[in-house]
Amino acid sequence: MVSSEDLFRRAKECIPGGVNSPVRAFGSVGMTPRFIRKGLGDRIWDVDGREYIDYIGSWGPMILGHSHPAVVEAVGKAVADGLSFGAATEREVEMAELICSLVPSIEMVRMVNSGTEAVMSAVRLARGYTGRDKIIKFSGCYHGHCDAMLVKAGSGLMTQGIPGSAGVPEACSRDTLCAVFNDTESVEGLFEANPGEIAAVIVEPVGANMGVVPPADGFLECLRSLCDQNGSLLIFDEVITGFRLAPDGAQGYYHVRPDLSTFGKIIGGGMPVGAYGGRREIMEHVAPCGPVYQAGTLSGNPVAMAAGLAQLRVLKDTPDFYGKLNGVGDCFFGELKQLAGQAQIPCQVNHVGSLGCLFFTEQPVYDYASAQTSDTVRYTAYFRHMMDRGILLAPSQFEAVFLSSAHSDADLDRTLEAVRDFFR
Ligand SMILES: *Cc1c(COP(=O)(O)O)cnc(C)c1O
């Protein structure tokens, strides 16, 4: 039988760091990454034969749990018809219609292959549409790994202590201005210092790549009005929050309407999919309608569309799906908060619906700087404690706990019991 240790040794010889994405490496918790064999519901099994209750959920996509029968069946059917044509197919139209019907701010949408690609394309479109170059982002918000967005970009970089990235020319990030999450004055200051130059403000409406950091009351509304006053576009990066907090994402949950939105993760049901969309008048600037070029050989791939459509349809057709899942989140994170409050160790719990995070710090966490006060050594001890009890959390303090509709009451209780043990 293979083991994770064997596979990691082989992987390190031929894959940088032995992994195809840095957060998988378990480096910050000083362990060998687990190689996963299969998943079902809220459980996953590694090649070593151990079973875990999974709270990573592929970093967000698996909102129905692993191997949901509707998704698996839809993929099987699509595969039987062929894997890719590089030509238009019916499922792409169904996907676009479904997204437009679920998210009122979206009149047109373009499918791409990842969240990174969605953001890169939305930023290009905002620049092409406004004829301006500068973008305001927030420290600690992650928007994928395209050059212009790798500035103070949250989890992967926080965990490894990399300030930005080597290989990003200054020219590529020069027009990316960084504001402070939940600090509207920092945004006003940037608008004042760069009059008529800001193409867009991009934000994770709930910060979910520096741990979980909810928007303060009025923060998103203020971004909306600053963009309106300055002729700039507001982009919500809903790659995590989209189809997770509500059918219409964080924009529906908080009632703030962006000009452009980006999606990924849940929208693909576990397949590599991203999307960006918004008002018709803006989206008509994208080629072949307009002058902003963006393309993709595998964009709208039939198998990927089948998976995403199947998952979105279950979300849409399950009565009160979001009321229930968010309710489970309120209970679970509420109890976690209670445990944290009684603990001898200083800690904080932030949560919105099915997203949450336990920070090991004595101060409330409302932005990047306060998130960084967390004791990551303590987190490592916590992570290992939970893993020993068959509970898999993200191997980083600065990631969310992702709940799915497959998490059973018994498993959530078992998880809280393990947390109680840790605090004892
Ligand atoms: C994951 C993520 C991305 C990048 O998506 P990929 O599919 O990994 O390229 C962008 N924005 C946010 C908010 C994310 O969480």
Image (cartoon, rainbow, N blue to C red):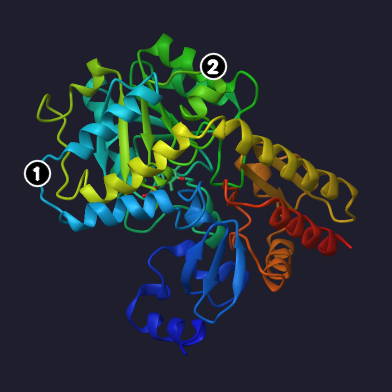
Question: Is 364 or 80 nearer to us in this picture?
Answer: 80
Alpha carbons under labels 1 and 2: distance apart: 40 Å
- At label 1, the amino acid type is Ala
The residue depicted at 40 percent of the width and 49 percent of the height is 70
Percent across and percent down for residue 110 are 24, 34
**Mark 1 or mark 2, earlier in chain:** 1
Say the numbered circle drawn on residue 221.
2
Say the numbered circle drawn on residue 307.
none
Write down the residue under mark 1: 87
* Mark 2, other Cα within 10 Å: few <14 / some 14–19 / many ≥20: some
Q: Is residue 354 above or below residue 376?
A: above
Secondary-structure class at tag 2? helix
The answer to whether the beta carbon of the residue marked 1 is less than 8 Å from any atom of ligand 1 is: no
Secondary-structure class at tag 1? loop
The residue depicted at 47 percent of the width and 37 percent of the height is 315
Q: State whether residue 236 appears in this view.
A: yes
Q: Is residue 10 above or below residue 224?
A: below
- Does 230 sit left or right of 152 as displayed? left
Toward which corner of the image does residue 76 lie, by quadrant?
bottom left
The residue depicted at 61 percent of the width and 41 percent of the height is 354
- Does 358 sit left or right of 103 as displayed? right
The quarter of the image holding the C terminus is bottom right
